[in-house]
Image (tube, rainbow, N blue to C red):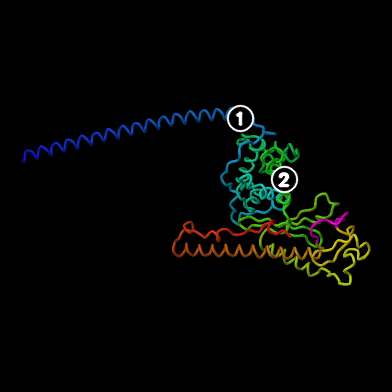
Amino acid sequence: AAAAAAAAAEEEEEARVEKASENGRGRSRTRSATAAHEDNDQSHSGSESEGSSSLAKSNGSGGSHKEGEEEEEEDQAVPAFPLDTPPAPEVVCCEASADPDFLAVWMFFDIFGKDLMLPDFSLDALDTALSVPAHAAGLRSLILRFLRKFYVANAMSNWETVFARFISKFDPALGSRLSPLAAATVADRTTALRILLESGFEYSSKLQRILSEKEPSDLRPAPLGIDRNGSGYWLITDEHQSLRVYAHENIYDASQPAPAVTRVAINLHELGELVERLETEREKLRPYKKKDKDNCIECGSPDHPDRFLLCDTCDFGCHLQCHLPPLPVVPGGSWFCPNCRHAALCETAEAAFKRLTTVVAKRETRQRALMRLRRNIGLDSSNILFDGSRRSQRVVTYFDLDV
């Protein structure tokens, strides 16, 4: 019995050793097959890279002028540019936003940015990039993106020369001042960016299609309001609650080919001062007298009542010919006299100031709470999940402030 047991144990040991050796051979065959497969993949990818590089060389040598070329494929989402992150407060420079072309550039991004799959830019970042060449890395990426779409595909090595040559097609004098771009003035850089963006309406079939699908009201955002003297105010903001306010002087004066545009506020403090200044002007307005309700508020004459334009708020009115600018017929829609128009501007500007102040206060409160958590218990803010209703703060734009 002992001998039989020993023989059985020896047979089991031989079977175990044989099975282990077979498993080892199987693993070695698997490793060799995997290595061979990886070698084939590397050789295949190498051939593909050689083919793609040769294709790129052929495309570069053949030139890639894209005038009138149809854009059949949709744009893919691109990585966020540095322009979508606000710079540190001590780095922010607001020289470029003093130029009226900056307002046109920002409105282009606001109206067409989502359709072109552009990131949500920061006002301070865009302003600083245009003002200080040392912080223009994001601006370079933006210019290259549009150059490739509208003009030339291979513009990496000599993009400044290509950019200056492209702008020269529209403004030769400006194009001659753009090379190098860092030596150009802030106004020239801002104007050149506006020309580059607006050239898409001529060179980009996709942008032309987007433009045709837009409503006229989407292409001409309503102002924040119009004051007693006929100056319109536009407020632009971003998701970081940065803001710029512009005043268009005498927008109703047809004698001026291009109304003067002035930047009147660049932060929340200056917006508050603007609200106070408008309220002071409102208090100085001469109120209309009830006995003059049948008289023109401009000339004081009751003649030609059939050519009166009545205010939808106070029922005072003026002659069509006394209106600024003069009107041939009674316009459709609502009309407000200068006093009521100025009062509406004050109310809308004050509402915008309060809403932005509330958003900024909530953001600062949350930042202080995060700093306390980080200081007291060493909690990383990236590990905190906020409720969706708290994360999405409503931002005031000129679309929300239509009067």
Among the 4 quarters of the image, the one containing residue 305: bottom right
Task: Name the foreground residue: 39 vs 315.
Answer: 315
The residue range painted magenta reads 324-335
Which residue in the protein does label 2 denote?
A: 191
Query: Which amino acid type is shown beneath numbered disc 1?
Result: Gly
Give residue 134's position: percent from left, percent from top.
Answer: 62, 47
Q: Nearer the viewer, residue 216 or 99?
A: 216
Quadrant of the image containing the N terminus: top left
Tell me what residue is drawn at x 44 percent, y 63 percent.
Answer: 377
Picture residue at 9% right of the left edge, 40% below the top: 5
Circle nearer the N terminus (2, 1): 1
Q: Which mark is residue 254?
A: none
Q: Categorize mark 2 by other alpha carbons within 10 Å: few (<14), some (14-19), many (20+).
A: many
Q: Say what amino acid the circle numbered 2 marks.
A: Thr
Secondary structure predominantly adopted by residues drawn in magenta:
loop
Q: Identify whether 146 is placed above or below 35.
A: below
Q: CA distance from mark 2 to mark 1?
A: 29 Å
Residue 333 located within the stretch drawn in magenta: yes
Say which element carries label 2.
Answer: helix
Which is nearer the eye, 253 or 125? 253
The image quarter containing residue 324 is bottom right
The quarter of the image holding the C terminus is bottom right
Please provide percent x and percent y for residue 227.
78, 61
Which residue is under mark 1? 60
Q: Is residue 91 above or below residue 371?
A: above
